[in-house]
Image: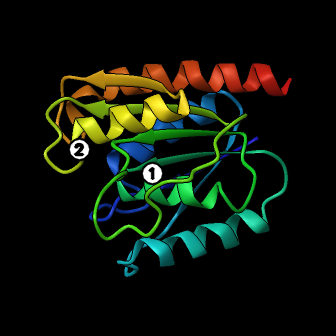
Amino acid sequence: MKVIFSHGKESGPYGQKIVQMSQVALTKGLQVQSVDYLGISEPEARVEKLVKVLSVTNGPCLLVGSSMGAYVSLVASQTVPVAGLFLLAPAVGLPGYAMQSGFQLEGVSTSICHGWGDKVVPVSNVVAFAEEHRADLHLLDSDHRLTSVMPDIKTLFALWVDVQLGRAG
């Protein structure tokens, strides 16, 4: 099984969150890949890039995304089947993003971590999204970047990966 990471708008493919979560995935025997979206500012162009990556990837994939990267992972999962989504501060319900509704996530294990103090993506947007799709939702005492709660996110991610491996095995 492979974990494919998608970074946020102002981050990069080897940011702190991705590096730490990659280490978790590697300790569980998973392959990891981080897609480089630097220089691609439009969310839909990033989706196209991820769909291309997924189309040449063998085996089941788990997508992990942060902010715009979470949106990109969500939209790409509508084109290419994935085993699961782990979303950090997902950019849902925001202007400038083409897909606002109609996500089909039935059968896709979806877990969301979001900060109570997020000033970029309103908590209410994420709660409504999680409720609509019956996604696991972890609201943490942090801001949009979630760096203050990375130990908690790593723990949640490790548990989520264990569940995905149990489903695959």
Q: Which residue is mark 1?
A: 70
Q: Secondary structure at mark 1?
A: helix
Tell whether 3 sits left or right of 38: right
Decide which of 137, 60 is in the foreground and name it: 137
Looking at the image, which residue is at 46% across and 21% down? 156
On residue 145, which mark appears? 2
Q: Nearer the viewer, mark 1 or mark 2?
A: 1
Q: Secondary structure at mark 2?
A: loop
Tell whether 63 sits left or right of 107: left
In the rendered image, residue 36, in percent from the top left (x then y), is placed at: 48, 69
**Relative to residue 129, is residue 160 depicted above or below?**
above
Amino acid type at image mark 1: Ala
Looking at the image, which residue is at 47% across and 37% down? 21
**Relative to residue 113, is residue 32 depicted above or below?**
below
Looking at the image, which residue is at 64% across and 41% down? 105
Q: Earlier in the sequence, mark 1 or mark 2?
A: 1
Looking at the image, which residue is at 28% across and 65% down? 95
**Relative to residue 86, is residue 94 depicted above or below?**
below
On residue 43, which mark appears? none
Compute the Cα span from label 1 to label 2.
Answer: 13 Å
Tell whether 128 sits left or right of 95: right
